[in-house]
């Protein structure tokens, strides 16, 4: 099961448990608390009424029509109250009064007068000086039909003493407070639904963020390209520590593998020129004609130069691969840099009678690392000269495509690159034989070029160009085009 599903599932389970607990708490606490408030109010009302009717009870005026009319007018009084969005229009209370023996002497409903209520809990406890309260159902099977009765003693003042002369009980149906309880339940349900949806949405975001972050660390650990940056997570210390641990481990493994690969490659590449130098040196020990000695000496010099170039380029490649994104961006004139690079290769072009045509925009400024761009130009020009026939043409074009992008094209007349090699020319240590000498290079130059362009967030492509596709040359030669976008 996906970690996203697991996190979302457990978040949802926790939310549902929380909602169940809230519902249980509501049933166990909210409803009793509402009834406790009602009981508190009824207790106060009962004691107030007990004081108001005490004189009437003592003078036996309770059963008179005048007393009943006064009570009925009070109970039937119309009210217009908006209590917590509930419209209350009438009083939902009933009153009955008993004498000191518990016999009902007045009932506002007119059905219990004369009955013995001395055994009812509210009257029974009050007659004995205790707090009297009871809740009785009108229908035994219906919990909403219960009515709460709160009793208060009726005293008559005789000098310094009080005499208990009766009990007044006020009853209020529990159904009358149900709208307030129902409203609270409905509001709780609505809020619970919104909280559930919001919580599940937030849980999904957290789960997705965590899954996405873990995937970033996993992909980073799986990727072996040296230009990858260690992922960083905001407000996620543990993930950053995991990513850093992977980075440290990766660096150690890469360094070890890189050294092994570097040593193996360098050993292999050095073997051929060293063997040639050793063979030439051994032959020079013999008594040879001057011309042969000069040929062997020239051969030793060429192989030594080849070793020097190989070592220099290996060091450049190592520096580039280990520097990662530590390139020094500066603003410089690319048009001038191209001309300087051409000046450095003037002797080679003169030797092969290469004609170089320039279509360069003047003062083309660029933000890049000057050193590495110069190495890139030198390597591409070296390749163009190596694969060009004598008296061939080389074309260099430089134009600004937009305020942020330039296009550089370097074309050399010559044989096409084989189709199988077009996808491998940028691979490290891959090289093709030169058309004249049939010798191969170290295969490092174009690898350096590609990494430099990629670190500058540019693009480079090598294309075989057919006849008449470069009209500026005014010739019908085919060749190879290196296209760079920076």
Image (tube, rainbow, N blue to C red):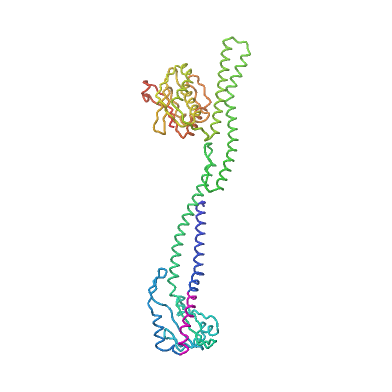
Answer yes or no: is residue 463 visible: no
- Image quarter for residue 183? bottom left
Percent from the top left, x then y, of residue 276? Answer: 58, 19
- Judge by depth and name the residue closer to the eye, 17 or 98: 98
Task: State whether residue 355 is above or below residue 39.
Answer: above
Q: What type of secondary structure mainly makes up the magenta span?
A: helix
Percent from the top left, x then y, of residue 234? Answer: 52, 47
Q: Which residues are magenta?
A: 38-59
Q: Residue furthest right?
A: 285
Task: State whether residue 240 is above or below residue 38.
Answer: above
Q: Residue furthest top?
A: 289
Q: Is residue 43 magenta?
A: yes
Percent from the top left, x then y, of residue 218? Answer: 53, 44
Q: Residue furthest bottom?
A: 60
Percent from the top left, x then y, of residue 321? Answer: 54, 33
Task: State whether residue 458 is above or below residue 475.
Answer: below
Tell me which residue sits at (48%, 53%) in the image. 204
Q: Dividing the image into 4 quarters, which one contains the C terminus?
A: top left
Task: State whether residue 39 is above or below residue 314.
Answer: below
- Judge by depth and name the residue closer to the eye, 425 or 241: 241
User: Along the horizontal axis of the image, is 64 left or right of 274?
Assistant: left
Q: Is residue 166 magenta?
A: no
Give the tally of numbered discs. 0
Tell me which residue sits at (46%, 85%) in the image. 53
- Image quarter for residue 403? top left
- Judge by depth and name the residue closer to the eye, 191 or 66: 66
- Judge by depth and name the residue closer to the eye, 438 or 32: 32
Answer yes or no: is residue 366 visible: yes
């Amino acid at each position: 099961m996906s970690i996203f599903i697991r996190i979302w599932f457990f978040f949802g389970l926790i939310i549902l448990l929380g909602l169940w607990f809230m519902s249980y708490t509501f049933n166990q606490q909210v409803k009793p608390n509402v009834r406790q408030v009602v009981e508190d109010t009824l207790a106060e009302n009962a004691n107030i009424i007990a004081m108001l009717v005490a004189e009437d009870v003592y003078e036996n005026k309770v059963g008179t029509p005048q007393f009943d009319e006064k009570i009925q007018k009070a109970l039937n009084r119309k009210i217009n109250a908006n209590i917590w969005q509930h419209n209350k229009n009438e009083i939902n209370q009933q009153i009955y009064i008993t004498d000191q023996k518990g016999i009902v002497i007045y009932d506002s409903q007119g059905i219990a007068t004369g009955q013995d209520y001395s055994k009812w809990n509210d009257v029974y406890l009050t007659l004995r000086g205790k707090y009297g309260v009871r809740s009785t159902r009108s229908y035994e099977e219906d919990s909403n039909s219960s009515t709460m009765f709160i009793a208060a003693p009726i005293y008559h003042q005789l000098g310094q003493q009080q005499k208990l002369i009766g009990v007044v009980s006020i009853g209020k149906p529990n159904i009358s407070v149900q709208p307030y309880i129902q409203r609270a339940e409905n509001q709780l349900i609505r809020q619970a639904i919104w909280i559930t949806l919001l919580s599940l949405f937030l849980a999904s975001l957290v789960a997705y963020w965590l899954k996405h972050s873990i995937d970033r660390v996993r992909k980073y650990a799986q990727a072996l390209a040296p230009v990858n940056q260690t992922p960083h997570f905001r407000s996620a210390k543990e993930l950053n520590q995991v990513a850093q641990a992977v980075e440290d481990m990766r660096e150690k493994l890469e360094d070890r593998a890189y050294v092994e690969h570097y040593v193996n490659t360098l050993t292999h590449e050095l073997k051929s020129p060293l063997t040639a130098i050793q063979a030439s040196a051994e032959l020079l020990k013999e008594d040879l004609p001057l011309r042969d000695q000069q040929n062997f000496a020239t051969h030793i010099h060429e192989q030594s130069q080849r070793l020097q170039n190989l070592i220099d380029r290996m060091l450049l490649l190592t520096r580039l691969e280990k520097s990662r994104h530590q390139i020094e961006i500066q603003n410089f004139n690319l048009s001038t840099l191209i001309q300087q690079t051409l000046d450095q290769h003037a002797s080679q072009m003169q030797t092969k009678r290469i004609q170089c045509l320039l279509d360069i925009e003047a003062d083309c400024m660029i933000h890049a690392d000057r050193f590495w761009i110069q190495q890139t130009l030198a390597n591409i020009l070296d390749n163009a000269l190596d694969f060009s026939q004598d008296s061939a043409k080389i074309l260099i074009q430089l134009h600004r495509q937009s305020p942020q992008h330039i296009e550089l094209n370097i074309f050399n007349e010559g044989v096409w690159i084989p189709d199988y090699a077009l996808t491998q020319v940028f691979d490290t240590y891959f090289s093709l034989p030169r058309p004249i000498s049939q010798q191969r290079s170290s295969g490092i130059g174009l690898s350096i070029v590609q990494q430099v362009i990629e670190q500058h967030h540019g693009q480079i492509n090598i294309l075989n160009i057919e006849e008449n596709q470069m009209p500026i040359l005014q010739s019908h030669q085919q060749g190879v085009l290196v296209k760079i976008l920076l």
